[in-house]
Image: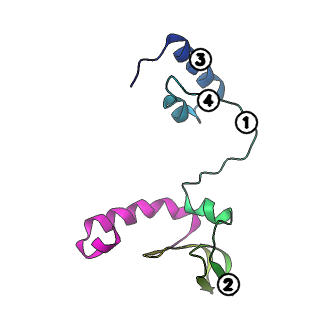
Amino acid sequence: MLAEAPEIAGARHRIARRIGKIALGVLAGLGARGLVVEGRFAWADLGSWDVWARLGRSRARLLEVESRNVRAIGQPGHLLAAVGVRDLLIVQTPTATLICRPERTQAVRAVVRRIAMDPRLAAYR
């Protein structure tokens, strides 16, 4: 990493004190060419499947029968059907399908670890 000019380090420290702990991770990675700009806008963590589903970023068609609060992300032209279920997220890809409660989407890391360890699942790596 390049050495940081003292005025940049001082500015980063002053900004960090003003905005608090929430954005410190962002500030830590700014480096000498970083810029912080105040903005008044909604934030969504697009690294999370449940956020993509809430934002309606699916091209799949969802058919719900006696179901409630089901969100789905899938391939264009693919029909996903939910029957008698509630509070679920369905993510369909060409090689795998994830079904979970929206608050558990970060547990996909555990799924990825198991796929990596199981030789029978090598085709899905």
State the separation of the CA atoms marked 2 and 1: 38 Å
Q: Mark 3 points at which residue?
A: 11
Task: Please tell me which of labels 4 and 1 falls first in the chain.
Answer: 4
State the separation of the CA atoms marked 4 and 1: 15 Å
Tag 2: amino acid: Glu
Task: Say what secondary structure mark 2 lies in.
Answer: strand
Quadrant of the image containing the N terminus: top left
Front residue of 93/50: it is 93
State the separation of the CA atoms marked 3 and 1: 18 Å
Q: Residue drawn at (29%, 64%), measured in percent from left and top?
A: 116
Q: Residue drawn at (63%, 29%), measured in percent from left and top?
A: 36
Which numbered marker is on residue 107? none
Residue 47: percent from left, percent from top = 54, 54
Magenta stretch: give its range: 98-125
Residue 119: percent from left, percent from top = 23, 72
**Is 111 drawn above or below residue 62 in the view shown?**
above
Q: Residue drawn at (51%, 22%), measured in percent from left and top?
A: 32
Which of the two marks, 4 or 1, is nearer to us in this view? 1
The answer to whether mark 4 and mark 1 are in CB contact below 8 A is no
Residue 74: percent from left, percent from top = 57, 74
Q: Mark 4 points at which residue?
A: 20
Q: In the image, is residue 105 part of the stretch drawn in magenta?
A: yes
Residue 33: percent from left, percent from top = 53, 25
Which numbered marker is on residue 64? 2
The answer to whether mark 2 and mark 3 are in CB contact below 8 A is no
Tag 4: amino acid: Gly
Task: Say what secondary structure mark 4 lies in.
Answer: loop
Query: Counting other residues with Cα less than 10 Å from the Cα at mark 1, is it few (<14), some (14-19), or many (20 or more)?
Result: few
Which of the two marks, 4 or 3, is nearer to us in this view? 3
Task: Please tell me which of labels 2 and 3 falls first in the chain.
Answer: 3
Query: Counting other residues with Cα less than 10 Å from the Cα at mark 4, is it few (<14), some (14-19), or many (20 or more)?
Result: few
